Amino acid sequence: MEKMEVEHCDFIHIHGKIVEEARAQMPAGDDIKDLADFFKVFADATRIKILSVLLHSELCVCDLAGILNMTQSAISHQLRVLKQMKLVKNRREGKTVFYSLADGHIKTILSQGMEHIRE
């Protein structure tokens, strides 16, 4: 892997007005933590696979387990995490629970992320 050099200032000088304006635009500490936790969910390949499959169709745990060649227990565990972070929602039809993406934002995040890594 090629070593990448990081550029830095040769002369140390703080641009006070710009720094203050940037600081004023920063989200609150709790929002930063919540956003970091939100993106942590995307750091797991299994969860990304589940979300990617749900981009195209509403599915039950059995379907997801079959598609991803995993146990229902493992899928259920990941769905619980995704549901807690409001990335997926579910609906019950008789004895079957179907999962789908919570909203259009999730599709946008996945699509833009994929576009970014393919550039």
Image (cartoon, grey):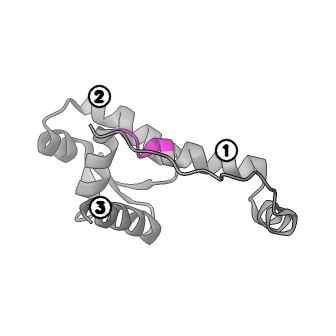
Reading the chain from its start, which is encountered first: label 3 or label 1? 1
Q: Is residue 11 left or right of residue 50?
A: right
Q: Is residue 110 left or right of residue 71?
A: right
Instruction: Point out residue 6 in the picture as x, y percentages from the top left corner.
Output: 50, 47
Instruction: Point out residue 95 in the picture as x, y percentages from the top left corner.
Output: 29, 45
- The range drawn in magenta is 40-44
- Image quarter of the C terminus: bottom left
Query: Is 43 part of what is drawn in magenta?
Result: yes
- Determine the image quadrant of residue 45: top left
Secondary structure category for the residue under label 2 = helix
- Residue assigned mark 1: 33
The answer to which of 111 and 89 lies nearer the viewer is 111
Q: Which residue does the image show at 44% across and 61% down from the upper left?
A: 102
Secondary structure category for the residue under label 3 = helix
Tell me which amino acid carries mark 2.
Answer: Ser
Q: Which residue does the image show at 29% across and 36% down from the upper left?
A: 75
Marks 3 and 2, how far apart in space?
Answer: 28 Å
The reply to whether residue 49 is in sight is: yes
- Numbered circle sitting on residue 2: none
Mark 2 surroundings within 10 Å by alpha-carbon count, few (fewer than 14), some (14 through 19), many (20 or more): few
Marks 3 and 1, how far apart in space?
Answer: 24 Å
Instruction: Point out residue 101 in the picture as x, y percentages from the top left corner.
Output: 38, 60
- Numbered circle sitting on residue 73: 2
Query: Is 93 part of what is drawn in magenta?
Result: no
- Determine the image quadrant of residue 58: bottom left
Q: Is residue 53 left or right of residue 7?
A: left
The answer to which of 13 and 105 lies nearer the viewer is 13
- Numbered circle sitting on residue 114: 3
Tell me which amino acid carries mark 3.
Answer: Met
Tell me which amino acid carries mark 1.
Answer: Lys
